[in-house]
Image (spheres, grey):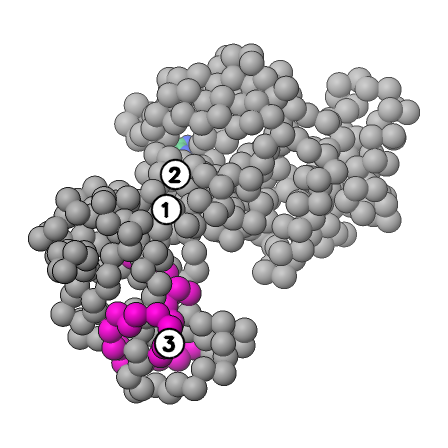
C-alpha cells in the first residue's frame, strides 16, 4: 500500500510568503492525481514537500502509513520527473538508467533486467548507447521516465514533465504516460498548469489557487459541478462565460435576467436559488452548451456576432448584446452564420451554473 495522506500541510517561505495553505488530501494507493492551477499557486511546492526536497512548515505527510515529515528524499521511496529531464549529459542512456540502481549497489544482472523491462515499456531499446544530447526532447523525457521505472518506487512525482515539448509531442507523451500507467500502476502526483493534461491524465484533478485547494474531484466533477467560479473558469476551453443576473420569481418559476438575456432556473437549482430571489448572482454558461437558432430549447436572448473563428472541427463565435459579451462554441463548422448576424441563443436550463457574487462559491 502506498497511499499518500497530506494533513493540514503548510509552507511559508522565509516566514512571510504563505505558498501552501492547510492542504488536506488523500491520494489512494495506485491513484493518479493531477495538481493544476495558475503559475505560483503552490503546485511545485506541494510536490517538493512530498518528495522531501522542501521542508514543511507545519502539518503531516504520510506515505504508505509512515510519517515521512523528517525522512530525507532517498528514504521516501519516491521517484521524481522534472520539466528539464535532468539527465547526466556525459553518460549514455543505459548508464543514466542504471545510475540510481548502481548507487544502491543493486547487482549488475538485476540492473540489466530492470533496464530491459523499462526500455521495453518505453521503446528505448535502440537508444541505449546514445548520449542525451543525441536524443530528441521526447526521447530524453522518455529516458527520464525510464529512470523512475527502473527504481520501482512506491510513488511517482511529476513536475510539468511535458512542458518543454512541442504541442504534438506533448500529446504523444501524454498518451505514453497513460500507457505506462496501465502497465506500471503506481501512486502518482502529476503537476501541470495545462488543464487538458490535468483532465486527461488524472483519476482525480486537484485545482489549486493561491496555495489553497479549490476543488478535488474526477475530471467530470470539476467540469460539470465546479465548486466555485475560479474552477468553473479554469477548467474547460474556451472558458465559461460569466455575467451578473437578477433573480426573480414569476408564475411559480425562478427567472435569471439581465437587460439582454432571460433564462429559467431549472428544477435542479430552484431550491438553492429561492434564497436569492430579488438579488443578483453570477450566471455561468459554457460556450459549448450554447445553441444557435435552436428550435427545441427555450431561447435566452439575441446577440450579435462580432467575430467568427473557424477552427475546422469547431467554430467559435464572439458575440455581444449591449455590454454583455459571450463566446459560443459549436462543433459544426458548417454553421450558416456571418459576422454582423443577430442570432438567437438558447441553453438547456440544467446547464446553467450559478455563483454567489461575494464568495464566488457555486450555489446549488
Ligand atoms: N524558494 C522560494 N523562496 C521564496 N518563495 C518561493 C520559493 N519557491 C517558491 N516560492 C513562491 O511560492 C509560491 C508557490 O510557488 P510554486 O513553485 O509552488 O508555484 P507553482 O504552482 O509550481 O507555479 P508554476 O506553475 O509557475 O511552476 C510562489 O509565489 C513562489 O514565488
Ligand atoms: Mg511549478
Q: Is residue 158 left or right of residue 108?
A: left
Residue corresponding to mark 1: 226
Residue 276 location (% of width, % of height):
14, 48
Within 10 angstroms of label 1, few (less than 14), some, or many (20 or more) residues? many
| 3D distance between C-alphas at marks 2 and 3 | 34 Å
The residue at the far left in this view is 278
Marks 1/2: CA–CA distance: 8 Å
Between circles 2 and 3, the one closer to the viewer is: 3
Disc 3 element:
loop
The extreme front residue here reads 251
The location of residue 265, given as percent across then percent down, is: 25, 56
The numbered mark at residue 215 is: 2
Query: Can the viewer see residue 186?
Result: yes
What segment carries the magenta color? 284-309
Counting other residues with Cα less than 10 Å from the Cα at mark 2, is it few (<14), some (14-19), or many (20 or more)?
some
- In terms of sequence position, does the residue under pointer 2 or pointer 3 come before the other? 2
Which disc, if any, is residue 294? 3
Image depth: mark 1 or mark 2 in front: 1
Residue at mark 1: C-beta within 8 A of ligand 1: no
Which circle marks residue 256 in the picture? none
Question: Per the image, is 346 magenta?
Answer: no
The residue lying toward the viewer, choosing from 18 and 352, is 352
Task: Name above or below for residue 267 compared with residue 54.
Answer: below
Q: Position of residue 359 (x, y in %)?
A: 21, 42
Element type where label 2 sits in the image: strand
Amino acid at each position: 500500500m502506498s497511499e499518500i495522506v497530506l494533513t493540514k500541510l503548510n509552507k511559508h517561505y522565509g516566514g512571510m510568503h504563505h505558498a501552501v495553505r492547510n492542504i488536506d488530501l488523500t491520494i489512494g494507493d495506485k491513484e493518479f492525481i493531477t495538481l493544476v492551477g495558475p503559475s505560483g499557486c503552490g503546485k511545485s511546492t506541494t510536490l517538493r514537500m512530498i518528495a522531501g526536497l522542501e521542508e514543511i512548515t507545519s502539518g503531516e505527510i504520510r506515505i504508505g502509513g509512515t510519517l515521512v515529515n523528517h525522512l530525507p528524499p532517498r528514504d521516501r521511496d519516491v521517484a521524481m520527473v522534472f520539466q528539464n529531464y535532468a539527465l547526466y549529459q556525459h553518460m549514455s542512456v543505459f548508464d543514466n538508467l542504471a545510475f540510481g540502481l548502481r548507487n544502491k549497489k543493486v547487482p549488475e544482472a538485476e540492473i540489466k533486467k530492470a533496464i530491459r523491462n523499462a526500455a521495453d515499456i518505453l521503446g528505448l531499446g535502440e537508444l541505449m548507447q546514445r548520449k542525451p544530447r543525441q536524443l530528441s526532447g521526447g526521447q530524453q523525457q522518455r529516458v527520464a521516465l525510464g529512470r523512475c521505472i527502473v527504481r520501482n518506487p512506491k510513488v511517482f512525482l511529476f513536475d510539468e514533465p511535458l512542458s518543454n515539448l512541442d504541442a504534438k509531442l506533448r500529446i504523444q507523451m501524454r498518451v505514453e504516460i497513460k500507457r505506462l500507467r496501465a502497465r506500471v500502476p503506481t501512486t502518482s502526483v502529476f503537476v501541470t498548469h495545462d488543464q487538458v493534461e490535468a483532465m486527461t491524465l488524472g483519476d482525480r484533478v486537484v485545482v489549486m489557487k493561491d496555495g489553497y485547494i479549490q476543488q478535488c474531484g474526477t475530471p467530470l466533477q470539476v467540469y460539470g459541478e465546479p465548486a466555485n467560479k475560479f474552477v468553473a473558469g479554469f477548467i474547460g476551453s474556451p472558458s465559461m462565460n460569466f455575467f451578473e443576473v437578477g433573480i426573480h420569481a414569476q408564475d411559480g418559476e425562478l427567472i435569471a435576467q439581465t437587460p439582454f438575456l432571460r433564462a429559467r432556473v431549472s428544477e435542479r437549482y430552484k431550491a438553492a436559488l429561492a434564497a436569492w430571489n430579488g438579488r443578483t448572482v453570477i450566471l455561468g454558461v459554457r460556450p459549448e452548451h450554447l445553441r444557435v437558432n435552436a428550435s427545441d430549447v427555450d431561447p435566452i436572448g439575441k446577440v450579435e456576432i462580432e467575430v467568427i473563428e473557424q477552427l475546422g472541427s469547431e467554430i467559435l463565435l464572439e458575440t455581444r448584446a449591449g455590454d454583455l459579451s459571450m463566446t459560443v462554441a459549436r462543433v459544426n463548422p458548417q454553421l450558416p452564420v456571418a459576422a454582423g448576424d443577430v442570432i438567437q441563443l438558447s441553453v438547456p436550463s440544467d446547464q446553467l451554473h450559478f455563483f454567489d457574487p461575494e464568495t464566488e462559491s457555486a450555489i446549488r
